[in-house]
Amino acid sequence: MTVRHHTLSNGFRVVTEDMPGLKSAALGIWVDVGGRHERVEENGIAHFLEHMAFKGTASRSALDIAEQIEDVGGYINAYTSREMTAYYARVLEEDVPLAMELISDILLNPVFDPREIEVERGVILQEIGQVNDTPDDVIFDWLQEVAYPEQPLGRSILGPAERVRGFSRADLGGFVAEHYGPDRLILSAAGAVDHDVIARTAERLFGHLARKSPVTAAPARFEGGEWRREKDLEQAHLTLAFETPGYRDPAFYTAQIFATAFGGGMSSRLFQEARERRGLCYTIFSQAGAYDDSGMMTIYAGTSGEALHDLAELSMDELRRAADDMTEIEVERARAQLKAGLLMGLESPAARCERLAKLTSIWDRVPPIEETVAKIDAVTPAGVRDFAAGVCGSGKAAMALYGPVGGAPRLPDLTGRLAA
């Protein structure tokens, strides 16, 4: 399997990986634009635009798009994150040209029919309502907001309902005109693909696009704080977050291994102590996410209102203890989990396709798997303990609580336990 790159004269990038033996392919366009690139009055428009992608072009109706991809047994979809928007498809080998044509059409020739805008506006408002009615979804938006207050990175990807109600056809077109330049587009494909054919097709479909002025996102500032909302629910939902390195930082893999060892699986110390030994919750985990210039390690738990105080304090005590006694065995187990997850994922063309795009966006190249594995293997127990000590000593944390949370300790009391 060979990764190949090609860059058009206008900056449009192509990255492919042929996977011998496969009869299908995954491909798509990844755009270096997401929620953090929106102005405050635009909050939610990147996601709205993603929804409109399949609602008709100059030559295809929404039904045409759906029928043409499904007539060949294919699948097409999209997603929006805080830093990227993706439009992707999964098809058989012989239908790769069709998928490329469809994706290019929805990106380059959207009509933004006013009737379809109103239909999709209603769909998105329903989506916002569904998230708001799902405590273990909405609490992460609140945590993000309190971690990065008054910043694009802290805002919801869906946007507030009042913004969504006001977006117009001109707003959508203006966002595309400002952000969808060829040097911010990456065509990625993996599976049964021919790099040379895809590169030539990309030249035909996207080579005419003119470069746009660069647009940069505001730097992230993790500030932290507390958000709590009392509501009569069966469970209290607790999230805690600490700043961790962005994905360009050399300590990125240390953060990943620490979060995995601390609360990433059933053998982790957080799961074992909180659920298995103390019975304080059903669900508890930690994970480390990353952005270009910042990251967050998040702890989540769902528990009863009566157990919330003890669970919150236990989480802080376990975090402090990890800085003292995280063992070689725990680190080795976390390394194995990360490597297995990475390597198992590479058996999927869709996972490879997404990996190619994201790494090209970050590094303008795709590091070999061996390079990534070596970075994971280079993380030491001492490095993990030092990392945990840095988290404990940072003095900054974010907390969001939802449900019967009246008995929860205040954030300063919890962070005080880290220094105890």
Image: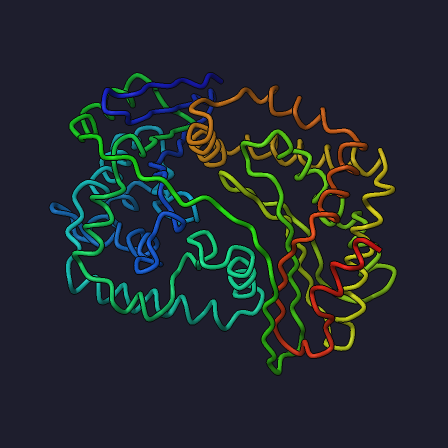
* Residue 415, x across and y down, in percent: 74, 58
- Identified at 78% across, 51% down, the residue is 319
Left or right: residue 299 compared with residue 5: right
Q: Position of residue 60 (x, y in %)?
A: 15, 48
**Residue 351 against residue 285 in the figure, above or below:** above
Q: Determine which quarter of the picture holds residue 120.
A: bottom left
Picture colour scheme = rainbow
The part of the image, by quadrant, that contains residue 184 is top left
Left-right relation of 275 to 208: right
Q: Is residue 303 above or below residue 327?
A: below
Quarter containing the C terminus? bottom right
Q: Residue at x 28, y 25 (%)?
A: 11
Query: Residue 409 in the image: x percent, y percent?
Result: 74, 70
**Residue found at the very far left of the displayed protein:** 58
Point out residue 371 in the picture as x, y percentages from the top left corner: 60, 20
Q: Residue, x 81% and y 43% (percent of image)?
A: 323
Q: Report the front residue among 252 and 330.
A: 252
